[in-house]
Image (cartoon, coloured by chain):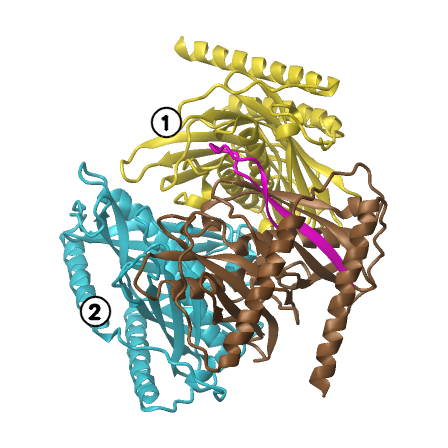
Chain colours: A brown, B yellow, C cyan
């Protein structure tokens, strides 16, 4: 699909959220198709988790996004999908890898949305593929448990904040879930949620550094709770950490099923987004340091620094490996 | 144009904001065409004001909206446009008047957006039409001055609010202004702003009464300040008054030109929206009374009551006149 | 309606697909209204066929599209609609004919979507109008039978293709059918399908000649099979023929009802689109010749050449007639 002006910021860079939405749609289609490939109860694959994703190079208006998806592992009740996005400049023919993402889906029965069905197993070319997939499956299972416990936090409003403090750039939006946001089961597509999260995170980043910003990476996102059509969702973001050239923003999604539902507002998703600031020529700019005020802000800054250093170390290890 | 699921709430009623957007687009086309009808500097008509508008009957998914527009008065620098919206059920052929709106536009030069051009005068059938138009022109001019002074208010966040208080239902959303939101001059279409305002007001109303709600009327809206492409706009709403069967919500639009601009965040628009609550059969439901806590909330409630009684008296006078 | 940036390519020319979508919506409204004009079973008009359409002059961002529709013939079970599109520059007042299209609709019962209802006959001003309409009706009926047989072809992927070969530019996209894509009957609007077809054909054309391209014409399109909400549709295009200044692209639409349906993937629509390449000043550019490799490609090239020469001959005959 060709990238349109509405898919991009004013500098012409396509929003990370638009790309995440395309990735999720491709993943939902391939895994729903797979889960319905054997006779049995019809089902729709629902997004359970997206692994950490790096945005390797920016995509621009007028370029064509090529999205390809492949099922790489199946457990009894879940499907792992690998999605690759290439941007193609159809005028020059130049192609670049934009993204590689790994998503986990779970098949839910069309008749009873609370019933998780069994996944038809795939065939592996080599035994190691199955073993590695199983390892990835166990790892993500652990991580999902962890975030579930972390989910209690709330973003409190700040009055008359100083520039570069957490309160100055924090932002939130509300969105009424409409029919086009939803799957056949009447629940919000994971991709729609991620697009809104990227929108809020991008505004937080732009408010902080007042320049053109782009999504650099998204940490693993777990979708613990479904969000139903007709809900109001509140998406809130606050900056947690800055390095010299990057900003980390924590984003929360809360769902409020406020019509005809006994249920209270609940936390549906949370995640960390990393942004960089770019000059008009597309070069990375230095980022103003985040001013932390409260104890909580200082703690979150340190935790963010930990994640930042860990990712940096991992990347260096990979580069050394690749260089050998 | 046929109304789609995305234009409506889950009960199938088309959002008031969708209708306001169609009205404004029709007004912008007819007044831009008129202002360029004589040789001279090319210009784009920008929305300056929408008069109070009643939503006479709800429109539904699958119905066709017929929008017609007519220029009814011209002053030296402004154009008054009357827009009528009819909903047509193309299956039964039934037509109903949905809206009658009056809008004021001002021609801005394409070359210099701060230059207001002169409007070619229209011909009136009768002298009284011109006199009545002039009276309407003077009245709206006064009202615009008044709201300009009122615009200093800010919505402060409330922590852990009780149900049915002002703080409980107040809501806000942020929106990054994209290219498709803007006119040729690079400023947000008035219709886009009104659609976002209706969205926030609708969420405030639904949070308060937790039922299906529809827009009943919109008070006069003045567009004092233009909003440029690339701005972030914050749209906030709070309930000001409830009668037995209606809710009044005040909505503010603030623009934040946060990239490459020396300018501070500023108030661009504010307005009052009135909603009613409907049962599944489309009958009006009683509305829970708004609980006011602070002195400001009590004052705003009384002011809202004043507007409510004034509108009611006007309507009764019109009905008596019509009955004679 | 005013043309927005998202309706156009990066050179500012409105996509042919956007125009086809507006045309089809106008046709669906007027024919649904007509078919329900007599008491009887309520129905929705479904698009069965669009006759060959030429794009006479490009439309640009900021221009207003004026769409008018008229019923020109009725058979027992079908309605012929003529739709005209004018582009209007509201700054200069200039108007140009963009398109004249002829569409055929069939009324389907709201209660039973497989039941085709009877069409109320229209009154003709002159007997010849009815006779000419009848002739058009018989001709399109024959043509529909023909394409129905042709529909078996599949687009196979090619690895590492050479520039200007068929495999180099062939493209496909997938789209998950959402609620706003559909009519009241829950089937995809013909206009939505045509817009996606134009998008793919445009990507094929741009990949081939690496310049700004615009839709010049669309051959007759027959809608043999309905596509239901929730389907995944795959739209694929490949180049079949190039003349000095034009490219012909064949587009296929396949529907995959992959949830809750026993049915296999099926061919829903196919059609030929013709594009021209334009310089920055809007002048036609020469098109690189298509390199055909396989026997099938050579055969399709010759068939395309046949269509091209036939159209050229027809146009010359019309111009001679007009000149007399």
User: Which image quadrant is residue B24 in?
Assistant: top right
Predominant secondary structure in magenta? strand
- Is residue B120 or residue B22 the one in the foreground? B22
Q: Position of residue A106 (x, y in %)?
A: 47, 58
Report helix, strand or loop for mark 1. loop
- Is residue A102 or residue C95 the one in the foreground? A102
- Using the image, determine if residue C10 lies above or below residue B34: below
In magenta, the rendered stretch is A246-270
Q: Position of residue A43 (x, y in %)?
A: 38, 56
Q: Which residue is mark 1?
A: B281
Q: Quadrant of the C terminus of chain C?
A: bottom left
Q: Which mark is residue A39?
A: none
Q: Which residue is mark 2?
A: C143
Q: Residue at x 20, y 72 (%)?
A: C146
Viewer-side label of 2, 1: 1
Please check the rendered image and state whether residue B106 is part of the magenta-colored stretch, yes or no: no
Q: Residue at x 73, y 20 (%)?
A: B296
Please check the rendered image and state whether residue A258 is part of the magenta-colored stretch, yes or no: yes
Is residue B262 visible to us here? no
């Amino acid at each position: 699909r060709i990238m349109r002006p509405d898919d991009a910021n004013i500098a012409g860079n396509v929003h990370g959220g638009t790309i995440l939405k395309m990735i999720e749609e491709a993943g939902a289609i391939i895994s729903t198709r797979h889960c319905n490939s054997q006779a049995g109860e019809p089902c729709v694959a629902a997004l359970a988790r997206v692994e950490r994703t790096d945005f390797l190079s920016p995509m621009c208006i007028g370029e064509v996004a090529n999205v390809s998806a492949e099922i790489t592992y199946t457990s009894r009740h879940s499907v792992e999908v690998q999605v690759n996005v290439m941007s193609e400049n159809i005028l020059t023919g130049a192609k670049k890898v934009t993204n590689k993402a790994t998503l986990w889906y779970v098949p839910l029965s069309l008749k009873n949305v609370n019933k998780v069905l069994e996944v038809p197993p795939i065939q592996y070319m080599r035994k190691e593929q199955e073993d590695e997939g199983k390892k990835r499956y166990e790892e993500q299972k652990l991580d999902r448990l962890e975030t579930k416990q972390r989910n209690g936090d709330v973003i409190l409003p700040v009055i008359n904040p100083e520039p570069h403090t957490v309160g100055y750039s924090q932002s939130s939006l509300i969105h009424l879930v409409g029919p086009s946001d939803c799957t056949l089961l009447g629940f919000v597509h994971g991709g729609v949620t991620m697009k809104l999260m990227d929108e809020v995170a991008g505004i937080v980043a732009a408010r902080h550094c007042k320049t053109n910003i782009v999504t650099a990476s998204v940490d693993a996102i777990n979708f613990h709770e479904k969000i139903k059509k007709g809900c109001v969702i509140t998406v809130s973001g606050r900056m947690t950490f800055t390095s010299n050239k990057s900003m980390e923003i924590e984003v929360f999604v809360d769902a409020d099923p406020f019509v005809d539902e006994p249920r209270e507002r609940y936390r549906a998703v949370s995640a960390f987004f990393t942004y960089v600031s770019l000059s008009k020529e597309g070069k990375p700019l230095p980022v103003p340091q985040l001013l932390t005020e409260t104890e909580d802000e200082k703690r979150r800054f340190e935790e963010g620094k930990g994640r930042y250093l860990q990712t940096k170390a991992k990347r260096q290890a990979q580069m050394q490996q690749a260089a050998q």
